Image (tube, grey):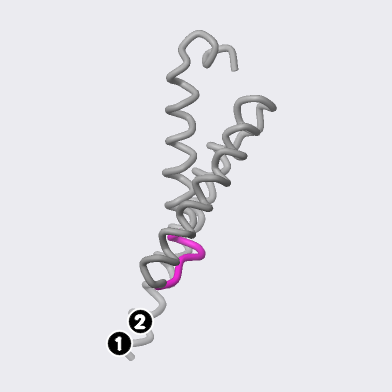
Amino acid sequence: MRATAENPWYGFYGFLAIVALAIIVFNLGFAKKLPILKRVLVYITLIIGCFVLWFLEFFFGAPIIVVLIISGIVLGIYRFRLHLHRQQKNET
């Protein structure tokens, strides 16, 4: 919060980081193939929801960015292991 008061761009950069990480986590964990208009609606809703996460991060000190990074790592490992499992299953 204090860093944001000193340089207002930090808040904007934080918001962009939250949006980028939320999109990555969404795509790794929950995304399905959707028609383009539904996909646009989902991403617009995601960006609005990220404003709430940004508010929690910078005004209440919740570690939202760290949690999104950890979630991305865990879901990435899960997807990688799932890919290896499917690859092994197809080989046999």
| Front residue of 74 and 6 | 6
Q: Residues within 10 Å of mark 1 (few under 14, many from 20)?
A: few
Q: Residue furthest right?
A: 60
Measure the C-alpha gap from mark 2 to mark 1.
5 Å
Q: Residue furthest bottom?
A: 92
Quarter of image, res 38:
bottom left
Q: Residue furthest left?
A: 91
Q: Residues within 10 Å of mark 2 (few under 14, many from 20)?
A: few
**Stretch of the chain drawn in magenta:** 27-33
Q: Position of residue 13 (x, y in %)?
A: 43, 28
Q: Residue furthest top?
A: 6
Evaluate if marks 2 and 1 touch, with contact meaning CB atoms under 8 Å apart.
yes
76 in the magenta segment: no
Type of amino acid under label 2: Gln
Q: Position of residue 16 (x, y in %)?
A: 43, 35
Quarter of image, res 2:
top right
- Residue 88 has which mark? 2
Mark 1 residue element: helix
Type of amino acid under label 1: Glu
